Amino acid sequence: MLDPAVLDTVVPDTVVPDPAVADRVLLNLALSGTASHVETVVRAVRRRQAAPTDTAARRSLSWRWADDGSLVLRGRFTPDEGTALIAAVEALVPPRGPVRHPVPAAPEGWRERAVEEEPGPAEDRVAARRANALLALVIGGAGAPDGGTNAPVVARGRAQVVVHLDVTTGTARINDGPELPPTTAERLACDARVQLLLDDRENNRLYLGRSRRLATPAQIAALVARDGARCQFPGCTHTRHLHAHHVRPWWRGGPTDIDNLILICGFHHRVIHDHHYRIRRLRGRWEILRPDGTPVAATGAPLTGNVERLIESAIQGGLAITRDSLTPTWGGERLDPEPIIDALLPYRTKVPT
C-alpha cells in the first residue's frame, strides 16, 4: 500500500522527524489507503505521545442545560475506564436486525410506527439507543436490553427527581433545572422515581395533594399478574423496569386503582404522553389509540429505507456518484501503523556524552 522508498528515507536514530518525510508518508497513506487508515495512524500517534499520567489527569465529566431544556454531557475517561463504559452501554443496546435485499418500499403507516417503535424519531437512531442504554445503567438495568432477568418488573424506589409545580403559572420545572413541557410533567406524575412538590401562590412548597399517587406493592403484584409482566403497548417485548401508568391521569382525579393502571415501559410511557395517545379497556385487553383515534395494531414487517429514493435524490442534487467514487487503491492487506508512526515520530536515542 505504501511506497517502501518513502520509509527507507527515514533515519532510525533521528531525534526530531523530518517534516518533509512526514508529509510524504501521510500523503502517500491518504492517496493509497482509506479514511479509516488515516484515522488509525492519527490515533496511534496520539497514543504514543500521551503519557499515562497525563491521560488520567484529564479525566472529567461535565454537563450543561441546553436552550431547549435537554441535558448535554461531556466526559473523558482513561482508556481502560472508557472501554468498560462502552462495553456496559453496548451490552444494553438491542442488536440490529438483518438488512434484506432488495430493500422493499416503506410500509403503509410507517410514520406512525416510527413514533411507536423504539427508539422513536431520532436524528441518529444508533446514538439514541446508546442514550437509552446509558439511562438504563443509571436507573439500574444491567446485562440485557430489557434490564436483565434479575431486574424488577415494575420500577419503584426513592425519588431521584424533584419536580416543582407552580399553581400561579401552571408551569413545572425540575429542581435546579429547566422548565418542563406540560406533557413531560404529566408523564413524571406517574413515575415512582419522581417527587412532586407544589409551589402555592405565596411560594410555599407543599407536598402535592393526595397521598396515594403510587401503586402499593399489592397493587403492583396484581398488575404484574393481570398484564403478564410485560409492557402492554402492542408489539413491545419489554419485561423489566415498567411503569404503572394512570389511564385516567392522576392530576385529573384518576384513582390509583387496578382498573385505572396499566404496565408500560419507559419508552412507550413517553410516547403516550408526548404524542397524546389514549388507552381504553376492551373485554379483558387494553387498546392503545393514536391521536386520530385509530388503534395501534401489532407490529408488522420491520421498518426499512428505500434505496431507490436515495439514488433519485443524489441525481437531483447533481452528485456524480459512481460505483468507484469511494474505491481506494488499497489492495485489502492489513494496515500495520508501526512503520508509519516510526516515520512520523522516530524513537529517541541517547546521545553519547
Image (cartoon, rainbow, N blue to C red):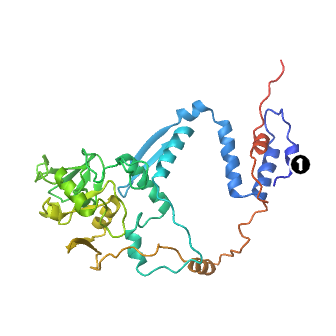
Please tell me whether residue 215 is drawn above or below residue 282 in the rendered image.
above
From the viewer's side, name the closer residue of 150 and 159.
150
From the viewer's side, name the closer residue of 118 and 282.
282
From the viewer's side, name the closer residue of 181 and 156.
156
In the rendered image, which quarter is residue 283 located in?
bottom left
Q: Residues within 10 Å of mark 1 (few under 14, many from 20)?
A: few
Residue under the image location 13 percent in, 63 percent down: 254
In the rendered image, which quarter is residue 255 located in?
bottom left
**What amino acid is labelled 1 in the image?**
Ala
| Horizontal arrangement in the rendering, residue 215 relative to residue 324 (left or right) | left
From the viewer's side, name the closer residue of 151 and 38.
151
Please tell me whether residue 231 is drawn above or below residue 81 in the rendered image.
below
In the rendered image, which quarter is residue 350 located in?
top right
Please tell me whether residue 246 is drawn above or below residue 350 in the rendered image.
below
| Horizontal arrangement in the rendering, residue 83 relative to residue 228 (left or right) | right
Residue 140: x and y, percent?
Answer: 36, 46
Residue with the most extreme top position: 353
Residue 60: x and y, percent?
Answer: 48, 38
| Horizontal arrangement in the rendering, residue 39 relative to residue 280 (left or right) | right
Residue under the image location 16 percent in, 54 percent down: 213
Q: Quadrant of the C terminus?
A: top right
Residue 83: x and y, percent?
Answer: 54, 43
In the picture of the structure, the residue carrying the numbered disc 1 is 5
Residue 180: x and y, percent?
Answer: 28, 57
